Image (cartoon, coloured by chain):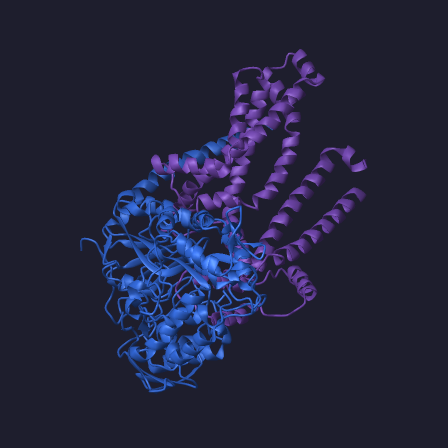
Amino acid sequence: MLSTERGVRARAAAIVAAVAVVAAGCGSSGNAAKDESPTLVAYTGQSSDYQINFNPFAPTSIGGTGTIFQTLFFYNIVRDEEPTPRLGTQFAWNADGTQLSITLREGVSWSDGEKFTADDVVFTLDMISKHKGMNSTGYAGRATAVDDTHVTIAFDQPSFVDGPSVLGKTYIVPAHKWKDIADPAVAVVKEPVGTGPYLLEEFKPQAYTLKANPAYWGGEPAVKKIRYLALSGNQAGTTALKAGQIDWQTGPVPDVKDVEKSYPGYKAVITPVNQIALVTCSSAPLGCQGPQTDPAVRQAIYHAIDRTQLNALAFEGTGRDVSPSFLLPDRDGELISAKLRQRTAPMQPDPARARQILEGAGYAKGSDGFYAKGGKPLSLTLKTVSGWTDYITAVNTIGQQLKQAGIKLTPQQLSWNEFVDAKDRGEYQLVIDSLYQGPAPDPFYVYNYFFSTAQTAKVGAKPGPNVSRFSDPQVDQALDALKRIDPADTAARQPHLETIQTRIEQAMPYIPVLTQGTINVYHDAKFTGWPTDGDRYAFPAVWAHPDNAEVFLRLKPAGR
Amino acid sequence: MRYYLRKLAFYLVALWAAVTLNFFIPRMMPGDPVDILMAKLQQRGSGVDPSARRAYELLLGTDSDEPLLRQYLSYLGNLVRGDFGISVSDFPTPVSTVIATSLPWTVALVGIATVMAVLFGIVLGVFVGWRRGTWLDSLVPATTVLSAVPYFWLALILVAVLGSALGWFPLLGGYDVVLTPGWNADFLGSALYHGVLPALTIVISSVGGWLLGTRNMMVSTMAEDYVLTARAKGLRERRVMVWYAARNAVLPSVAGFAISLGFVVAGSIVTEQVFAYPGIGSKLLQAVQNNDYALMQAIFLVITVAVLAANLAVDLLYGIIDPRIRTGG
């Protein structure tokens, strides 16, 4: 016993000594690469090791979308502008929206040297329609190559609104590499061959590195290396940010108001994109239960929320105005209907209005200070996810604010899985969540996803994104009409957009809270050219693709 | 012989029960993998088309209406063949690959840390027990306080002090990601350097238990007649302490050590979270958060088998060490 114990102790001492030596060694070797162009270190929020897969069609693809594989066009969802040409240079619809003609860029080659042609585009689109598991955009066209640089896609129905997902979200892959893959939907792509500005340099489960493509058709990008790190989550991301170990992260950080002071060399930009809303299970005919099925209750809540206080307490002031029309005031300002009662939701509460609405709907205040109707108290539960600290603060704050308006709100924290399940089944009264935008800067998508009957289902069955179970024939009709109108014809679209806006302001299945600011923190002292409030050339989020590739293309190492 | 057979049979039944629970419990979780995947992609706000749900259902094969019993039987069959299936959260990587890449990190880190904690604890415990009544006794409350402090808090404090403020150790990760993993000095050195702080937190927070146990055993062993006899024979103090008292006092700790080795595989989810350390703990968390049944099952299975195997080893060893156990009950 004695001898072994001694032996182990001696070995332990040796290990400690070795560590000390290594520690000293590490310090000196760390700065060796100073002369080279700096590597941009990005953290996407990946919360465990990477498993290699650069298949752009896999839901678990770890990256390369935009940087290695490119789309035909780039749609900027944060600014109302025309799509930027990428692999395509021009596109045009026929009058009824059943045929899309695309002109492709000449002189583009794949990173293995082969030429990029219309056959690659047709191959990619055919592959998606053949393998249903890859068709995540509902593509239903038939593509044909006219010649090497022209492709036409025929659709059975007017498909203007399907354009952006084909043109802006479908990554084109090389036919000569992919045609021999038996089942491309489940193929693991380890050596991606693309047309994009970057190539895969090396992969490790803890990090992978992209290097600039010297043969890129747009010219070799100025940022030569990009490394994506795998950490354990946003907490670790913040620690790494504080230590200056990552250059780009998107997500809440402590002390966001003072990023430049707390993280020297870094800047933050806040982009309002997704509307935070109290999602209500709104439709009694589809099986929803509870007081929130009454539009008056939803309206009263809308007026009783003190958004200024909420923004300060829960969101560190990063929230922005929200419109009851669910248009983005920054982007869609011109589209917001003049017929709306309110262009944006009031930042100050209006308890008198809330009271008037409730009393008009037959509610009466009881001795406990809460409203009731027919003996049933106006009491609601609001679900959120445990661990989502900003939303938890928000629901508690809203609970206090509604109490003053005579509405009893009980916040409830669930696990993430339970929360998702409750939304899907419709077994909730209110949840706090955010709405999201489509593939183009066009409000059609947010309406189609969240307000159409096609995207909902009875309580108990699984709906699309429309978990509020909102169903309104007028809105459905307007959406149908919009599908048949060329998005370029804004005058023809406006009446339909206005119908939807006024209908959803009245019904209010989603009670608008604020527009969530996506917080983007970047190392401004190391690289220049980041998207800012003044120049939103892409959605500034490290995980948004292909937006991140647009950012990489514009960045330059600082001081060069 | 009958003793060993009975033990083996017991462990087989335990294994079957564990494997079965392993199958059913994850499936009682609300939601299914596609829901979670969709919600996760949507959370990013980068516009997920509603048709994606159907595509992913087809892709991940979650739309099958196969009855649970049939799924269970094919699960058992696959287990026998060593086929754990495909991970949904790292689709389409086989679960065995996911585990193979993450398990070594955990076994190395938590394994070494556990061995160190046990050695420190036992050695200190023997010493403190031998010198009972001196100032050394204050080590007992001191180390147990450290064990009682919530682990994540202790770890964060150490990170803040040793990593952030003093900069002695790296804050995050398993190695400097510039290096290539392999059997080269740079990488091994970096991995060792990155492992020190996480290992230190594990040692600090668990050494107290071992120290306390050994110290108390030591105190009661020292009251035994054979220790008195050894002293009466005029043996050197050191010899009495190590060969007569400590040798008997550490026996229960040895059994405890074998069992705690089994739990090494389970990793330390919190350690891996705090230090962004690669390992099985973070994969388990990922599996649970994504309703990744196959990955969850496989990781639980590895943990269960490790714990059962460690217990079996202790049982069998005890049979050899102490013949009374073999014939009793």
Foreground of the two, A157 or A404 = A404
Foreground of the two, A358 or A104 = A358
Question: x%, y% of residue B70?
Answer: 69, 66
Task: Give the quadrant of residue A301.
Answer: bottom left
Tell me if B19 is positioned left or right of A22 in this view.
right
Foreground of the two, A126 or A234 = A234
Quadrant (top left, top right, bottom left, bottom right) of the C terminus of chain B: top right
* Residue A185 visible from this viewpoint: no
Foreground of the two, A271 or B294 = A271
Rendered position, A317 above or below A475: above
Tell me if A378 is positioned left or right of B167 in this view.
right
Quadrant (top left, top right, bottom left, bottom right) of the N terminus of chain B: top right
Rendered position, A76 above or below B107: below
* Residue B269 visible from this viewpoint: yes
Tell me if A105 is positioned left or right of A498 in this view.
left
Rendered position, A249 above or below B228: below
Task: Give the quadrant of residue A87.
Answer: bottom left
Rendered position, A274 above or below A134: above
Chain identifier of the purple chain: B
The mark total stands at 0
Chain identifier of the blue chain: A
Question: x%, y% of residue A134?
Answer: 47, 73
Question: x%, y% of residue A127?
Answer: 45, 78
Question: x%, y% of residue B210?
Answer: 58, 30
